[in-house]
Image (spheres, helix red, strand yellow):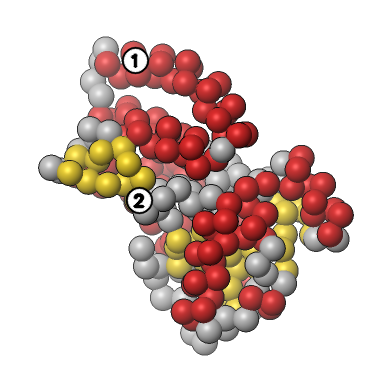
Amino acid sequence: MAGMQHPAGASLAAYCDVDGTLTDTTIVAPLVYVKRHALKPPWRWLWLASLLAHAPWWLILDALDRAASNRAIYRHYRGVPVDLMRSVAPDFGRRYLHGRIFPQARQRLEALRSQGVRIVLVTGGLDVFLESLIAEWEADVLAPHLEQANGKYTGRVLPEPFTGEVKARLLREHAARHGLDLKSCYAFGDAYGDLPMLECVGHPVAVNPDRRLRQIALERGWQVEKWR
């Protein structure tokens, strides 16, 4: 998915994870938002109640295998009409996501943009929900999407979940396409799964890091920041 126009002549980039790094969100938030619009009572309430049963399993799975966790969550989009989600997604961005941007994230990215740095969102979140962030920072975006069939989503994430080494590969490919020197670029991430992406650049920053990422960042002398 292509972003909007980046700063003219940008030769550096800041590669940013989204959920937990730039925003106080998880990939479950848009799913709940969509289901509230897609389902009518009593099915809506039954699905929301089932969420309480799924949530602990998703947390455990996320700690073991984030890609598997993402697949499990995205399967719940199965059967959602494509037109409905496309109509709901911008509303989610305006009403929810935009208001969950950490003030420090907004300040840091605006400072980087003023220096001519290209902002690139590298996220496991679905591309359809990111329009408000793309507009906020005139960002490029590297994000997965959902498979469609007969006007509905199948629940299958394509091309694959964007986690771990996949994020790092996408980052390197983006830099190569745009002739960027990764030794001079930035990356921001909050989770251990962002480590491969952070290792790609000369200026890695651990933002609101989990325990494992924080320990590694401190051992390597990386910047560790708390954004709220």
Is residue 223 depicted above or below 193 in this figure? Answer: below
Q: Which is more toward the observer, 148 or 206?
A: 148
Amino acid residing under circle 1: Trp
Few, some or many residues within 10 Å of mark 2 (<14, 14–19, 20+): some
Q: Secondary structure at mark 2?
A: strand
According to the image, label 1 marks what residue? 45
**Spatial distance from mark 2 to mark 1, Cα to Cα?**
29 Å
Please indicate whether residue 140 sits to the left or right of residue 145 in the image: right
Q: What is the x, y in percent for residue 152?
A: 19, 40
Residue 67 appearing in the image: yes
What is the count of numbered marks? 2
Q: Between label 2 and label 1, give the one nearer the viewer.
A: 2
The foreground one among 183 and 160 is: 160
Where is the N terminus found, in terms of image quarters?
bottom left
x, y percentage for residue 217?
79, 54
Q: Amino acid at mark 2?
A: Leu
Q: Position of residue 141 (x, y in %)?
A: 45, 62
Identity of the residue furthest to the left in this view: 150
User: For the point 32% across and 41% down, which residue is it?
Assistant: 156
When asked about the image quadrant of residue 39, the answer is top left
Pick whichever of labels 2 and 1 is earlier in the sequence: 1
Q: Could you say which disc has been placed on residue 158 in the image?
A: 2
Q: Is residue 114 visible?
A: no
Residue contact between numbered discs 2 and 1, judged by CB atoms under 8 Å: no
Please, is residue 213 above or below residue 143 in the view? Answer: above
Q: Residue at x 34, y 30 (%)?
A: 76
